[in-house]
């Protein structure tokens, strides 16, 4: 009876040992891929995407001299004044 318990103990011990070793190997093989560029970054580098973020809008005006804000495209003139074009095509300065 004592030998059976001893053998059973070793079998359980070996199974736990190999199971934990197998799981460690799987976790080491798992690769973490970098995430895609967040949407905010895409908006930052494309002034033609409309945004509701005022700070991003100002940053794009500084960088590209144009930016879409809430569906309306704004431009920066050579005198550093901000304007948009009306439906008639006239410049409306802000």
Image (cartoon, rainbow, N blue to C red):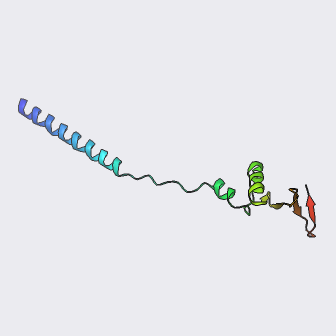
Query: Which residue is nearer to you in this view: 62 or 68?
Result: 62
Give the x, y percent position of residue 82. Answer: 86, 57
**In the displayed structure, would residue 93 be above or below residue 8?**
below
Residue 34, position as x, y percentages in the image: 49, 54
Residue closest to the eye, 44 or 19? 44
Which residue: 91% across, 70% down?
89
Residue 68 in the figure: left or right of residue 2: right
Looking at the image, the residue that sits furthest to the bottom is 88
Tell me if residue 22 comes above or below residue 75 in the rendering: above
Is residue 1 in view?
A: no
Furthest residue toward top: 2
Residue at left 78%, top 52%?
Answer: 58
Q: Residue at 79% across / 60% down in the picture? A: 65
Judge from the rendering whether residue 25 lies leftward or rightward of residue 83; answer left or right. Answer: left
Residue 28 seen from this side: yes
- Residue 76 falls in which quadrant of the image? bottom right
Q: Quadrant of residue 78?
A: bottom right
Write down the quadrant of residue 77 in the picture: bottom right
Rendering coords of residue 37 (x, y %): 58, 56
Q: Is residue 66 left or right of residue 46?
A: right
How far from the left and from the top, in percent, is residue 54?
78, 49
Residue 8 versus residue 36: which sits nearer the camera? 36
Quarter of the image containing the C terminus?
Answer: bottom right
Q: Residue at x 32, y 49 (%)?
A: 26
């Amino acid at each position: 009876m004592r030998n059976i318990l001893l053998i059973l103990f070793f079998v359980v011990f070996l199974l736990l040992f190999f199971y934990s070793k197998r799981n460690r190997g799987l976790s080491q093989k798992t690769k973490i891929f970098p995430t895609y560029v967040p949407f905010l970054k895409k908006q930052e580098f494309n002034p033609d995407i409309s945004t509701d973020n005022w700070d991003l809008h100002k940053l794009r005006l500084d960088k590209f001299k144009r930016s879409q804000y809430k569906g309306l495209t704004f431009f920066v003139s050579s005198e550093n004044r901000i304007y948009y074009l009306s439906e008639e095509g006239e410049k409306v300065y802000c």
